[in-house]
């Protein structure tokens, strides 16, 4: 009896593993089809990413918190206005939403220009989160920076309560599809930089990087916290 149960368990694990491998390979193939259609270089031996079973599923509230925090640090990064940043924390009830690095930035009344610039790029992460929550209908190509006025208007019009009422995190398969594609796009952008050539297909390297960063957080890549996310290619 024990031998039979062991056999059944082993068979189940084998079938599950095969199904996950098929899912990952199919996702990779779809991404490569997009790359080919857009004329973006790729390498076939770049690995697959997580599957639905092995990735982390964030809660709506986790993603809402991250959206609000990213928006606030980006505004302070862009404007350098410490008082405005503090006011936004109060307006969106965002106390406690920030990572250690973000909190240090928000506590600094006069951050240096380099640090401000780094945080201003987080608008691109907000774009990803608004798409992931179903607020934006499409993620769009990473070939231009996000429409910041539209983004600001969206969050201001919704407010924290409206954002919660409307937010519905997309199916994990959609998040993984986006993560797999940006992973391969980022490889192409990094390789172009190493080769001393222009990014392919008019891709914006900064936008690609920020989207890769945000999507890796969304799927729980390597279990890393936001401040420690890696964008391996």
Image: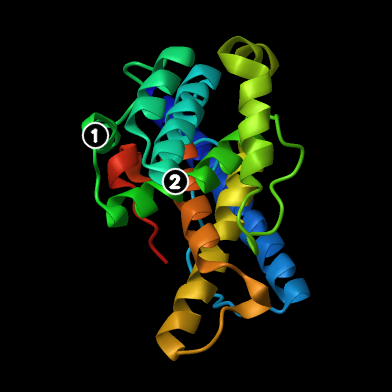
Mark positioned earlier in the residue sequence (1 or 2): 2
Query: Label 2, on which residue?
Result: 78
Can residue 168 be seen from the camera position used here? no
Indicate the secondary structure of the residue bearing disc 1.
loop
Question: Horizontally, is 31 left or right of 57 in the view?
Answer: right
Against 2, is 211 above or below? Answer: below
Which residue is nearer to you in this view: 24 or 152? 152
Indicate the secondary structure of the residue bearing disc 2.
helix
Model colouring: rainbow
Question: Horizontally, is 172 left or right of 100 in the view?
Answer: right
Can residue 208 be seen from the camera position used here? yes
CA gap, disc 1 and disc 2: 14 Å
Tell me residue 48's x, y (percent).
51, 59
| Residue at the (45%, 81%) spot, across then down | 193
| Residue at the (37%, 35%) spot, across then down | 81
Query: Label 1, on which residue?
Result: 109
């Amino acid at each position: 009896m024990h031998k039979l149960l062991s056999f059944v368990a082993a068979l189940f694990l084998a079938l599950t593993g095969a199904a996950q491998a098929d899912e990952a390979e199919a996702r990779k193939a779809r991404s490569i089809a997009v790359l080919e259609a857009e004329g973006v270089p790729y390498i076939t031996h770049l690995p697959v990413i997580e599957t639905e079973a092995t990735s982390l599923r964030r809660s709506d509230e986790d993603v809402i918190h991250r959206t609000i925090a990213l928006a606030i640090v980006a505004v302070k990064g862009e404007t350098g206005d410490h008082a405005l940043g503090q006011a936004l924390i109060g307006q969106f009830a965002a106390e406690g939403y920030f990572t250690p690095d973000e909190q240090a930035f928000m506590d600094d009344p006069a951050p240096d220009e380099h640090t401000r610039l780094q945080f201003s790029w987080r608008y691109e992460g907000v774009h990803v989160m608004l798409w992931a929550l179903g607020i934006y209908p499409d993620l769009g190509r990473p070939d231009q920076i996000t429409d910041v006025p539209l983004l600001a208007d969206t969050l201001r019009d919704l407010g924290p309560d409206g954002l919660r009422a409307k937010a519905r995190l997309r199916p994990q398969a959609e998040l993984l599809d986006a993560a797999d594609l940006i992973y391969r796009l980022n490889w192409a952008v990094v390789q172009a930089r190493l080769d001393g050539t222009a990014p392919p297909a008019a891709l914006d390297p900064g936008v690609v990087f920020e989207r890769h960063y945000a999507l890796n957080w969304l799927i729980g890549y390597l279990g890393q916290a936001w401040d420690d996310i890696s964008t391996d290619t």
